[in-house]
Image (spheres, coloured by chain):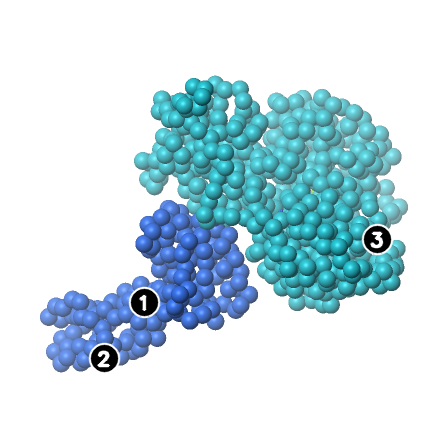
Chain colours: A blue, B cyan
Amino acid sequence: MRHILSVLMENESGALARLVGLFAQRGYNIDSLNVAPTDDVTLSRLTLVTRGDDQIIEQITKQLNKLVEVVKVVDLTEGAHVERGLMMVKVRAAGAQREEIKRSADIFRAQIIDVTPTTYTIMVTGDEEKLAAFLEALSGATIMEVARTGVSGVARGEKVLSL
Amino acid sequence: MSKSQTQPEMLSGGEMLCRALHDEGVEYVYGYPGGSVLHIYDALHQQTQIKHILVRHEQAATHMADAYARASGRAGVVLVTSGPGATNAVTGIATAYMDSIPMVVITGQVMSHLIGGDAFQETDMVGISRPVVKHNMVIKDPRDIPEAIKKAFYIAESGRPGPVVVDVPKDMTMPNEKFPYHYPERIKMRSYNPVKKGHSGQIRKAVNLLLQAKKPVIYAGGGVILGKASGELTQLAKLLNYPVTNTLMGLGGYPGTDNQFIGMLGMHGTYESNMAMHNADVILAVGARLDDRVTNNVSKFCPNAKLIHIDIDPSSISKNIPADIPIVGPVKSVLGEMLEQIEQSSQSVDDAALDRWWTQINEWRERHGGRYRKDDSKMMKPQFVIETLCKVTEGDAFVCSDVGQHQMFAAQYYKFNKPNRWINSGGLGTMGFGLPAAMGVQLNYPDADVVCVTGEGSIQMNIQELSTCRQYGLPVKILCLNNGYLGMVRQWQDMNYESRYSHSYLDSLPDFAKLAESYGHVGIVVEHAEELEDKLKEALAIKDKAVFIDVRIDPEEHVYPMQVPNGSMCDMFLSKTERT
Ligand SMILES: Cc1cc2nc3c(=O)[nH]c(=O)nc-3n(C[C@H](O)[C@H](O)[C@H](O)COP(=O)(O)OP(=O)(O)OC[C@H]3O[C@@H](n4cnc5c(N)ncnc54)[C@H](O)[C@@H]3O)c2cc1C
Ligand SMILES: Cc1ncc(C[n+]2csc(CCOP(=O)(O)OP(=O)(O)O)c2C)c(N)n1
Ligand SMILES: [Mg+2]
């Protein structure tokens, strides 16, 4: 089962290494990971996509909570939530393909954020499914480079992850 | 207001370190100097509050500090230099980590501006130690030192204890850079709040289940000792008249000579405790982590038992075996609350069922309990050596063990009636632990009988400490069960490799007695069972010198019972020829 864990932790050097080290050390998966300070710069929020049965996810959550710098951990996939990732795709765009690529981008509400006579760089946001579908839609074109942020997310409604 | 309150004293980083340790109540620091800690050593030299013990290898410093913590419950303190000093300490840090022992390790580091440049004696100690510490930190400003030290002790000693490394770059301790010193009284951290109390609802459920049990077992581990709860444990067991078994780490947490004590459980546990566990209907696990040396194959673990699990660390619960009633909290307060609830409960134990259960347990005891082969071989049996040690020390010595067969014999045949007396490396199983551990205990308990039970393999892993032992006049008694083999390895080779003894033979052993004498200690050789008791008494009567007692034992003797690999708890070899 896929789980999205959101972690609030002290914004201190070493905290991230400790968290990533924990996953390596205990053989847990990380599908994607994203981290940045929150509105309160003393705190970082980290969103991590991992996989495992209930027992493994329970252990991961407990082990994360044990890290001295971790303030709170929630499993977003336990309830209603929204998740988004951002992806930039640089494609070869010359001749007749230029128009076709632009049409695909429009359908996905993606933006072309850099243009040269031979390339487009397209930015698209969405959940993992949408990003995968967009890459699929571009499969006729030559993809030169892909950069993704990994998933970030919050619970729906009143529920928040804060101090 | 006095002057000192309005105007804080100005101290250098090195001086602040020493002062902070003193304000924390530290008496001894175990360490070894080198380039990056020279400012700290100079500060140490100019004060008298903290006493420094100079070891011969940094690993020994960590084991001394660790053993002090195991005996006293307070964090031990280590000071080592950067690079090789710090890496030499890693085994000792990992040893403490695996057994949840509080320790504060101060490691020197190269100057801040050199970090990352492969400077002389630079190693990323924070990175190296990360998987084997409870926490670690780097000092970035000398002004932070007092608070960092307070924090290190707080984290090391609270909750589930563990080692904390404080990495100190040399420029944080410059003698001429002085800062106002203030030692904080307490620390508050928003991201770290160990549980203080168990959930009362869960405790109520546990008490209900416990009182309904027909075949109960109390399975108590190292957490009872770490949590200073052997009083509560004993009270609970007595109130209910339930059998108690201990893990290797829990020995002494329940009186070893009490009739309700059914011995250690697990891989080398007693027949009766493994049988009782396997057949139990309710198991109360208290500060024990259902380690693989206890459970054997988890899918065959105690098929009919409901598990109540008390632990301060939620990650110990349902890690290996799912708990039916988890209780997160300190053993002392949880057991205290259980006692109250039981006393107030209208329910009572099922005496008839309990009688049948005790009859069954006593039958198991009769059948195989605590016996060893007293054959006609002239060789001395290691079990007999430990029994004799227990007799002459009246079961009241600190026994600090190394790792191997001798460790298991000590665990099985020394009867510990008090907590904190059995000092051994269980989780990591570090050969070389015993001698420095005994020295750490002896230093802090100068009048106590402190015995290092070791093997000729293990003792050679830190034998250089005989020199430290001499320097500080520590009268430890080293009882070497000399079988001429890496016995524990040989046992596995006998069982699983058709006795192909690949590198389990120790050739070129020194004459240990003479070696000890050359360091200024006393050396005694014991070759015959008849002379053992007298020689042990003679050794123990020597109060001002260390004594090395080299006991020649039967190399063929193996540790039994031994669980059959991959079986259930009750699948055991009972001797070379018998199996359950
Ligand atoms: C050669 C060899 C053979 C061995 N054979 C055996 C064997 O036959 N049997 C055996 O039992 N072991 C054996 N061991 C040891 C084994 O490897 C483990 O170290 C041991 O079983 C763990 O003991 P424990 O479960 O009591 O946990 P510990 O490692 O002592 O852990 C303590 C637990 O208590 C918790 N705790 C700490 N403080 C508190 C508190 N205040 N309140 C509540 N909980 C707290 C901790 O979170 C932790 O979960 C052997 C080791 C060696 C080297
Ligand atoms: C540092 C270290 N290396 C290797 C081992 C593996 N090991 C466990 S017991 C043992 C043999 C110990 O021999 P000895 O000290 O003579 O004790 P005996 O088993 O003979 O009583 C070995 C090699 C270990 N536990 N620690
Ligand atoms: Mg040996």
Image height of B34 relative to A89, above or below: above
Q: Secondary structure at mark 1?
A: strand
Q: Nearer the viewer, residue B354 or A117?
A: B354
Q: Nearer the viewer, residue B524 or B194?
A: B194
Q: Which mark is residue B369?
A: 3
Q: Residue at x 69, y 39 (%)?
A: B420
Instruction: Name the residue type under label 3.
Output: Gly
**Identity of the residue furthest to the left in this view:** A117
Please indicate whether residue B276 sits to the left or right of residue A134 in the image: right
Q: Residue B300 in the image: state x and y as whole percent.
A: 69, 66
Instruction: Name the residue type under label 1.
Output: Gly
Q: Residue B83 in the image: state x and y as whole percent.
A: 44, 36
Q: Secondary structure at mark 2?
A: helix
| Figure disc tally | 3
Residue bearing the label numbered 2: A107
Q: Does ligand 1 reach within 8 Å of label 3's beta carbon?
A: no
User: From this viewpoint, is residue B463 visible?
Assistant: no
* Parent chain of label 3: B
Residue bearing the label numbered 1: A85
Q: Residue at x 71, y 41 (%)?
A: B419
Q: Residue B162 in the image: state x and y as whole percent.
A: 55, 44
Image height of B223 relative to B178, above or below: below
* Parent chain of label 2: A
User: Gap between marks 1 and 2, in whole Å?
Assistant: 18 Å
